Image (tube, helix red, strand yellow):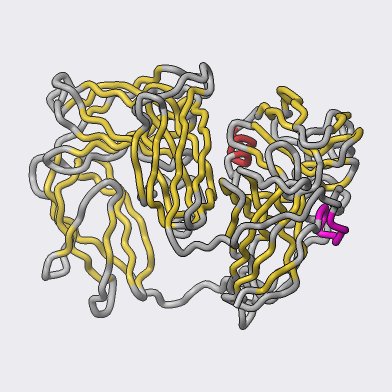
C-alpha cells in the first residue's frame, strides 16, 4: 500500500511552509513503471541548429550500465532520425535509460539517466557538435589496399561503437568522431587484426590512420604447470579469438607479430607475457603457469552486515501556481554501499541526477534512512522533499511544488583533459561543485561534458557565485556577482578555467 507524503519542502532539505497557491492543485494519478511510454528526440547541429537526418539514436538500459562511457554498451532500442531530424521510440518499457545520438558527421551526445514512466511521453532536443573524420587505407601484407574489411571504432569518451567497411581500394572513413583516444579493430575473413590506436585532437577535422595488416598465422598454446598437477586455465589474447579443444589446448588464427597473452584461472597466478608470433608456419607454444601459493594481504574496510535496498518514490511536480511542469530533474542521494569508511566532515554528498519528461517521476532512494530529494527545472525553479525512513520495496507517493526561484547558465571552458573528463560525468552530482554566497549550492545543477552548466534554486535578488564560477584567487569565496529573477535563468556566457580547476569550497552548508 502506498504511503502519501506532504509536499512543499524546499531549499537545503529544511522543512518550509508550502507557498500559497491561487487554487488547490489537482494532482493526476501517481505514476508507475508498470507499462510503456514514448520518447521523441529532435537532433540538431550545435553549430548551425540545422536538423540532422540519418543520425543513429540508441537507448541503453541504465540498470545494466550504471556508468558511462562504456565502449561495449548494447542498445535496448535504436533507430535513426528522419528528414526532419526526428527519431521516435515507441512502446518503451518504463524505466531509466541513457539516450545517445551520433552520426551525420557529428560527434556523440548522451542524455544520461533519462526516466520514463508508464504512459509517459518524453520529448527532448539533443545538440550534436561537429566531429572529426578519421580516414585511411587498410593494406594487406603485400601492401595492396584490401576491400571489404570490417572496421570497428571505439572510444572511452563515447558509448556507441562505430562501424565502417573498406572500399575497393581499401579506403575507409569514420565521420563524427569525438576528441580523445580511439582504437580501430580490423576484422578480415582470416580473423580479427590487432587494434590500432590514435588520438583525435580537440578541434581537429581530419585525422589520418593507415593500417598495414601483418600476415595471419595459426597458433596453438599448450598450458603447462610449472610444478604439480594440471589445473584449468583461461588464455586471453586481445583482439583475437582463441578456442579451447578437448585436450585443453588453445587454438586460433591471429595476426602475427609481437602479441600479448594473459593466463588466469582458479588457484592460478595471473600473468601476462609478450610473444613473437612468426608468420607462415604454425606456432605451437608451451605456456607455463604457476599455482597460487600465497595471497598478498590486502586491507579492506569492514562491511555492514545489512545494506538496505531501495523503495519506490512516485509523484508529480508542479510550479507554485499549480501549473504542472513538462521537463524537470530529480537529484537522489547516492546509495550507501555498506562499506564502513570514514567520511570527511567537509566533503559534499554525492547524488544521482535523473531527467523526466512531463510532470511525473518514479525514483528509488535507499530504504531505512531519511532522504532529501531535490527537484528543479532548467528555468531555475526548485524545491525539495524531506522523507522519513521507508521500508525496502515500499511505495511512497509524494507530489512536489517548486518555489519561484531562479538560476544561471553558461559554459565553462576546460583547459585540460582532466577537467573535460570530470564534466562528462553529468549524471553524478556533488553538492560542493558550485557555491552561492559562500555556501554550497547543493545538487540542483547539471554540468555537461562540453562545459555547459545550469544552476537552479537561487532566491530572487543579488548573489555572489564561487566554486567553479569563482572570479577571485580563492575559489572558496563567492566573488562573481549576479542578479536572479524568479523563473528565469541568467546567462553568464563563457567562463575560462585554469588547468586543474579551482579547489572545492571550504564551508559545508547549503544555500537557499
Q: Residue at x 43, y 42 (%)?
A: 159
Image position, residue 54 (x, y; %): 34, 28
Closer-to-camera residue (355/260): 355
Q: Up-down: is 97 above or below 491?
A: below
Can residue 190 be seen from the camera position used here?
yes
Q: Up-down: is 24 above or below 147?
A: below
| Main secondary structure type of the part rendered in magenta | loop
Image position, residue 212 (x, y; %): 23, 28
Image position, residue 1 (x, y; %): 60, 78
Q: Residue at x 45, y 29 (%)?
A: 107
Q: Quadrant of residue 9?
A: bottom right
The magenta segment is 10-18
Closer-to-camera residue (257/332): 332
Q: Residue at x 36, y 51 (%)?
A: 76
**Is residue 171 on the magenta stretch?**
no
Instruction: Describe residue 281's horizontal placement relative to residue 110 as left or right.
Output: left
Instruction: Describe residue 463's horizontal placement relative to residue 291 as left or right.
Output: right
Total labels drawn: 0
Can residue 432 be seen from the camera position used here?
no
Q: Up-down: is 14 above or below 108?
A: below
Instruction: Describe residue 442's horizontal placement relative to residue 34 as left or right.
Output: right
Instruction: Describe residue 252's horizontal placement relative to residue 211 as left or right.
Output: left
Amino acid at each position: 500500500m502506498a504511503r502519501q507524503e506532504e509536499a512543499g519542502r524546499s531549499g537545503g532539505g529544511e522543512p518550509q511552509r508550502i507557498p500559497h497557491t491561487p487554487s488547490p492543485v489537482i494532482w493526476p494519478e501517481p505514476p508507475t513503471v508498470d507499462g510503456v511510454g514514448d520518447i521523441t528526440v529532435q537532433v540538431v547541429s550545435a553549430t548551425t541548429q540545422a536538423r540532422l537526418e540519418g543520425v543513429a539514436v540508441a537507448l541503453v538500459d541504465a540498470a545494466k550500465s550504471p556508468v558511462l562511457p562504456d565502449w561495449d554498451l548494447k542498445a535496448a532500442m535504436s533507430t535513426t532520425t528522419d528528414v526532419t531530424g526526428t527519431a521516435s521510440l515507441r512502446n518503451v518499457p518504463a524505466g531509466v535509460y541513457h539516450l545517445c545520438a551520433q552520426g551525420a558527421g557529428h560527434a556523440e551526445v548522451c542524455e544520461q539517466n533519462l526516466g520514463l514512466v508508464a504512459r509517459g511521453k518524453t520529448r527532448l532536443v539533443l545538440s550534436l557538435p561537429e566531429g572529426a573524420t578519421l580516414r585511411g587505407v587498410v593494406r594487406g601484407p603485400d601492401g595492396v589496399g584490401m576491400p571489404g574489411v570490417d572496421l570497428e571504432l571505439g572510444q572511452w569518451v563515447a558509448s556507441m561503437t562505430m562501424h565502417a567497411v573498406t572500399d575497393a581500394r581499401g579506403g575507409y572513413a569514420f565521420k563524427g568522431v569525438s576528441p580523445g583516444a580511439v582504437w580501430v579493430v580490423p576484422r578480415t575473413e582470416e580473423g580479427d587484426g590487432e587494434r590500432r590506436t590514435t588520438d583525435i585532437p580537440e578541434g581537429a577535422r581530419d585525422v589520418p590512420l593507415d593500417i598495414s595488416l601483418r600476415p595471419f598465422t595459426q597458433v596453438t598454446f599448450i598450458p603447462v604447470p610449472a610444478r604439480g598437477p594440471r589445473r584449468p586455465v583461461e588464455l586471453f589474447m586481445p583482439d583475437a579469438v582463441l578456442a579451447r579443444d578437448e585436450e585443453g589446448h588453445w587454438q586460433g588464427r591471429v595476426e602475427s607479430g609481437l602479441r600479448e597473452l594473459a593466463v588466469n584461472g582458479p588457484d592460478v597466478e595471473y600473468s601476462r607475457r609478450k610473444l613473437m608470433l612468426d608468420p607462415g608456419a604454425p606456432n605451437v607454444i608451451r605456456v607455463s603457469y604457476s599455482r597460487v601459493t600465497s595471497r598478498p594481504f590486502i586491507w579492506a574496510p569492514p562491511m555492514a552486515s545489512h545494506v538496505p535496498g531501495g523503495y519506490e518514490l512516485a509523484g508529480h511536480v508542479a510550479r507554485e501556481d499549480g501549473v504542472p511542469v513538462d521537463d524537470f530533474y530529480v537529484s537522489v542521494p547516492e546509495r550507501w554501499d555498506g562499506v564502513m569508511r570514514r567520511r570527511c566532515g567537509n566533503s559534499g554528498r554525492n547524488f544521482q541526477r535523473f531527467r523526466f519528461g512531463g510532470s511525473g517521476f518514479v525514483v528509488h532512494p535507499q530504504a531505512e534512512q531519511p532522504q532529501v530529494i531535490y527537484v528543479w527545472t532548467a528555468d531555475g525553479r526548485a524545491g525539495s522533499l524531506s522523507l522519513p525512513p521507508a521500508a525496502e520495496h515500499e511505495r511512497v507517493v509524494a507530489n512536489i511544488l517548486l518555489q519561484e526561484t531562479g538560476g544561471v547558465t553558461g559554459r565553462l571552458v576546460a583547459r585540460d583533459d582532466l577537467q573535460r573528463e570530470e564534466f562528462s560525468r553529468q549524471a553524478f552530482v556533488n553538492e560542493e561543485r558550485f557555491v552561492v554566497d559562500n555556501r554550497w549550492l547543493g545538487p540542483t545543477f547539471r554540468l555537461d561534458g562540453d562545459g555547459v552548466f545550469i544552476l537552479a534554486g537561487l532566491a530572487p535578488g543579488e548573489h555572489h557565485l564561487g566554486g567553479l564560477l569563482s572570479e577571485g584567487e580563492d575559489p572558496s569565496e563567492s566573488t562573481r556577482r549576479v542578479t536572479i529573477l524568479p523563473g528565469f535563468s541568467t546567462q553568464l556566457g563563457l567562463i575560462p578555467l585554469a588547468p586543474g580547476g579551482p579547489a572545492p569550497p571550504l564551508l559545508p552548508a547549503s544555500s537557499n
